[in-house]
Amino acid sequence: MTAILYVDGIGLSGPGLDGWAQGAAVLRGEQPWSWREPAPHVPQLLPANERRRATASVRLAFRVAEEAVAAAGQPALGMASVFASADADSPILHRTCLALADAPQTLSPTDFHNSVHNAALGYWSIATGSRLPSVSLSAADASFAAALGESVTLALSESLPVLLVAFDLQGPPFLANVLEHRFTNAVALVLGVRRSAASIAALEVEPAVGDPTRMSNPDLEKLRSDGTAMRALPLLELLSLGRPGPVFLGGPGSLGFQLTVLPC
């Protein structure tokens, strides 16, 4: 089945990609890419008590979610949401496992509270007060593609705009060889079922089988191949250029998505 949604907002965070405006300039070739960690982010939507408990993964998800929602110019309260992460908060999981193995009585209640996979989505629901459908998922290095498929389903079945957030933290060195990513990275999209004043482009989505589209810039291709959320970079490149065209996004197993960027 082919679906058409509208891209109404984008959030981006990764090495050398500090927000959509700066990242888009890099993707267009207007700025050279270099490895720089994004500036720290303080979630603006979280109440003070929740902000103090928010972990690095929650702050990362909020960084791109808040950017995308602000660009869309729509209240987050009216959006369904899909949050995707290959490994969730791996530093907290690592600390929890160490505590359980060495001294269970030292296990941090806050770490335990934040260790669940849907922690970031829970904080987002608290911050926005949204009671609309929400999904938290993981599909290893195909997490962004899985989130896109889920977002299309939600948008069409519920006739709602959907906030898609994909994010992963750089894990502790001990887990480096088993994680699906090598660095901290995140992407967010607001996808609408109808064109709005904020719509950047239309996006045609169709399940398909094929080879993932790669970046021509070797540095950006390294980001794409080593970062779970960065699998979206070929799509973001087309959106940054305002150029129609196709992108193939690899999904779980052999099935992926043929994406076609169309002018609004």
Image (cartoon, rainbow, N blue to C red):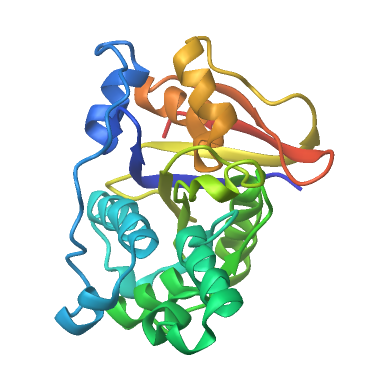
Would you say 26 lies left or right of 97 here? left
**127 to 7, vertically: above or below:** below
Q: Which residue is painted at 56% across and 32% down in the image?
A: 226
Quadrant containing the C terminus is: top left
Q: Which residue is painted at 45% across and 46% down in the image?
A: 170
The residue sitting at the front extreme is 102
* Residue 88 position within the rendered picture, expressed as x and y whole percent measured from the top left: 53, 61
In this view of the protein, can residue 15 be seen by the observer? Answer: yes
Residue 241 lies in quadrant? top left
Q: Which residue is painted at 49% across and 27% down in the image?
A: 223
**86 to 95, vertically: above or below:** above
How many numbered discs? 0
**173 to 213, vertically: above or below:** below
Residue 249 lies in quadrant? top right
In this view of the protein, can residue 117 be seen by the observer? Answer: no
Choose between 82 and 63: the one closer to the eye.
63
Choose between 147 and 92: the one closer to the eye.
92
Would you say 212 lies left or right of 40 here? right
* Residue 237 position within the rendered picture, expressed as x and y whole percent measured from the top left: 43, 23
Would you say 136 lies left or right of 111 here? right
Would you say 179 lies left or right of 77 here? right
* Residue 244 position within the rendered picture, expressed as x and y whole percent measured from the top left: 49, 22
* Residue 213 position within the rendered picture, expressed as x and y whole percent measured from the top left: 64, 22
